[in-house]
Amino acid sequence: MKQELIDALIGISGKDYVFFAHEDIEGYLYDETEEFVRPEACQDCVVIRPGTYEEVSAILKLCNETKTPVIPRGGGTGACGAAIPTVPSIIMSMERFREILEVDETNMMVTCQTGVTLAKLNEYLDEHVHALYFPCHPGDEGAQMGGMAIENAGGVRAVKHGIMRNYIKGMKVALPSGQVVQLGGKLVKNNMGYDLMHLLIGSEGTLAVVLEVTLKLYPRLDYTGALVCSFKNTEDAIESVAAVQRQGIIPLAVEYMDRMIAVETAEKISKTWPMSDEGKVDLIYMVEEATEDALYETAGTIAETCEAHGALNSVIAENDKDQRNILEVRSNIYEIFKPYFVDSLDTAVPMAHIGDLMRDIDTIAEKYHTTSPRVGHVADGNFHNFIMLEDGKVPAWADDMRKDIYEAALKYGGTVTAEHGTGKTRKKYMDLQFSPEVIEIMKGIKRTFDPNGILNPGVIVDL
């Protein structure tokens, strides 16, 4: 990285916020992408931490003029390699933008800066505006609002309130030229022109840099609960989820777990899994209601419906301790199994085809003489299947198996990635899902926003 560029960056944000020594930048070079699939990070990078929107604008103008790649970085919690620089780059960390700017209780919206973490937003709302809350939860509360917006974060609660796209009402962004623009706002209806805001949601830092987001809030229901239902097979479990929703019950979340995964995770974190029957599949239902009576009534109806559709047993968490036990097992699965898998896929299919996809994946696993343990957000069709290591190494067939699973999902009208994103790790599979004509349209959009290709090069499409 040329010294004159470093000096120019210091001139914009000050020497205390520009870093280029290896020990100072190494924590900014990787995200949470699995070790065996993530790209190798380029070490020839400079990290800058701007503190004003004017500084962001000046950095982008400088980099646009010099054609220097810029990697916008949030909390580093992504899992598709989108924040990993693979060429000499300016890594622009947005961590200093931490202000919650406004809570509009009338419109039930909050406007916050891009670097506000999910944990901080939740804590602030709980303390200052307890009647309202932000349901979206991708799993890591260190995630920042700008990153969640630009990655279109999902998570376990998408079944009831949707994914990040459903919450975002407005965004203030800086374009690659340095120009700052406001998109969207607090309107419920707005049909003027092309909807550029929704084009930016999920664009993974390739089109603009997020400065602020305005988010929809929901009334807080103070009573939450969890129950676990066991099934002998996937088909019964899936049908029960559909049957529950047909009754008008939309749970906060419905999580699918192979029993083997649940039991092993519980043992590793010194917890006890509540199911010990002959079931092979367990569903975790998370529900929320305004009163305790309504909570138990809803949980009871879910249990009865599941038992009418083949559930072997149902256990309702009677207290906070039991509820935490269940949810801690689910939240620790990834970390417990991470040392044993090459990759955690995140395909999705319409709910009616989940059983078809699971059968296909079992057949694919047999083809490669392996297994593919799975957990999933079953009510929205999004599953995480593991491709396992062999003797601690990446098997030669790993990418063939990955491709087979992607093609199986696409066969049922599904997608390669439902929530992790395209990034750098899924980019080479774009042509499985999209025609050359569609990919060329995406490239045209990238050229229009970023003609010099400075923002997050190598992610989603190449110019």
Image (tube, rainbow, N blue to C red):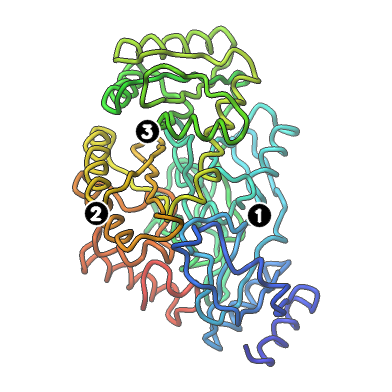
Q: Nearer the viewer, mark 2 or mark 1?
A: 2
Per the image, label 2 sits on a secondary structure element best described as: helix
Q: Position of residue 396 (x, y in %)?
A: 32, 63
Q: Give the residue drawn at x 31%, y 47%.
A: 370
The image shows residue 281, relative to residue 43, as above or below, that is above
- Residue 107: tell me if it is visible: no
Q: Which mark is residue 164?
A: none
Earlier-in-chain disc, 2 versus 1: 1
Q: Give the residue drawn at x 72%, y 73%.
A: 23
Q: How many marks?
A: 3
Question: Residue 446 or 278: which is nearer the viewer?
Answer: 278
Question: Residue 301 or 8: which is nearer the viewer?
Answer: 301
Q: Position of residue 80 (x, y in %)?
A: 46, 59
Structural distance between the alpha carbons of marks 2 and 1:
41 Å
Instruction: Tell me if 343 is positioned left or right of 24 in this view.
Output: left
Earlier-in-chain disc, 1 versus 3: 1
The image shows residue 27, relative to residue 99, as above or below, that is below
Q: Position of residue 365 (x, y in %)?
A: 27, 47
Residue carrying label 2: 404
- Residue 380: tell me if it is visible: yes
Q: Which mark is residue 378?
A: 3
Amino acid at the residue labelled 2: Asp
Q: Quadrant for residue 288, please give it.
A: top right
Residue carrying label 1: 113
Structural distance between the alpha carbons of marks 2 and 3:
21 Å
Instruction: Tell me if 174 is positioned left or right of 357 in this view.
Output: right
Structural distance between the alpha carbons of marks 1 and 3:
32 Å
Per the image, label 1 sits on a secondary structure element best described as: strand
Amino acid at the residue labelled 1: Gln
Question: Residue 439 or 139: which is nearer the viewer?
Answer: 139
Question: Residue 345 or 348: which is nearer the viewer?
Answer: 345
Task: Give the position of the C terminus as an image quadrant.
Answer: bottom left
